[in-house]
Image (tube, helix red, strand yellow):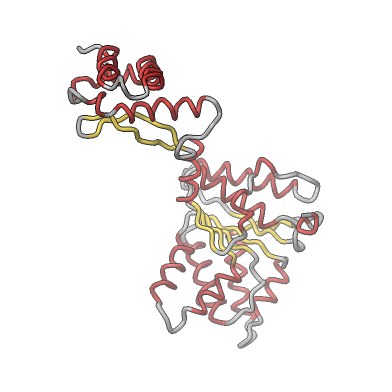
Amino acid sequence: MQNLSEILKQFQQKYSKIEETSLAEVVKKIANDEDVRHFWAENQTKLRQDAFQLKMMDLHEFVQQKERIAHGGKSLYPGYYPQLAIEKGYPHVRYVAEESTQKQLMQAEKLTSYKMPKAIRDADLQTIVVDSGRANVVTSIVDILTQLLKKDDTYVQGLYLYGEFGVGKTYLMGALANALAANNIDVMLVHFPSFAVDLKNTIGKNSDVREKLIMQTKTTTVLILDDLGAENLSMWIRDDILGVILEYRMQNELTTFITSNFDMNEMTTYLSETRDDRDTGKAARLMQRIKFLTRLIEVNGKNRRLEN
């Protein structure tokens, strides 16, 4: 087995005329780095004979970036830390996601957000102020989250949150969505009025896009329909979009949440009256599905939008 210090010494002698002082310091840091020494000891038989001499700058980058992180700085790729690997017989620096970055990447993969406000991306259950108007809903959300994390195929009923503008219904659902995604559970958070408008705009165009979006909404593990009742309702949206989504989710017992400014009586009235007709029967059938999928909770409190 070759001695690492000897290899580095040979390199230093070979390039002794190039910035002697700084080069000596670089070589010394590399020689004294425990990770480099361990990498050398474990992989010497896999490395080419001139590996360390030709890839000295890679080793320097590895040690330098580690040192920067150790002193509270960021690496060349923030959120990632350097790691030595072998590529065609030579040492190579690759960057591996830190735990927090891995969590963010997984969260981004598991969470589909459709036309939701940017502030929801940072919503966190741990930072929510639990006042008298939201204590019940926060407790219920945490209970449901706990049940979903068991992943035991038992049906978990969602919530129907209603209340005045700005009391935090959307933020609460955003915090739940982030928590679910961080725990490897697929969740889709949909601003329903925007969703309805976009679907209507696909009529006569690419139906594949529309069908794919509807299918994703139907089948996602957890669905959150935000601000239901704020859109200008048509028969098509009520019967062929909302009705189809809720029917599928009820039949397959998929956890669903809804937020609205309407309580369930007001929602019944809203669903019975479209621009095209009045149909209390269809509204009643939709409400049966909503009541199967969700449990009603009122969210009270001050308008937090005005505070901000």
Report the side of 221 relative to 279 (left or right): left
Q: Please identify the quadrant where the C terminus is shown.
A: bottom right
Q: Quadrant of residue 117?
A: bottom right
Closer to the camera in the image, 289 or 142? 142
Q: Quadrant of residue 215?
A: bottom left
Taking the spot 54% from the left edge, 31% from the top edge, the residue there is 73
Q: Name above or below for residue 201 compared with residue 64.
A: below
Taking the spot 28% from the left edge, 14% from the top edge, the residue there is 9
Q: Quadrant of residue 288?
A: bottom right
Q: Please identify the quadrant where the N terminus is shown.
A: top left
| Residue 177 in the image, given as x and y percentages of width and height | 57, 51
Closer to the camera in the image, 26 or 154? 26
Q: Name above or below for residue 188 compared with residue 228.
A: above
- Tag count: 0
Report the side of 152 relative to 145 (left or right): left
Q: Name above or below for residue 308 compared with residue 93.
A: below
Q: Name above or below for residue 231 compared with residue 135.
A: below
Taking the spot 72% from the left edge, 66% from the top edge, the residue there is 261
Q: Identify the residue at the far front of this view.
A: 17
| Residue 101 in the image, given as x and y percentages of width and height | 49, 40
Q: Identify the residue at the far bottom of this view.
A: 276
| Residue 216 in the image, given as x and y percentages of width and height | 45, 63
Closer to the camera in the image, 33 or 13? 13
| Residue 26 in the image, given as x and y percentages of width and height | 39, 21
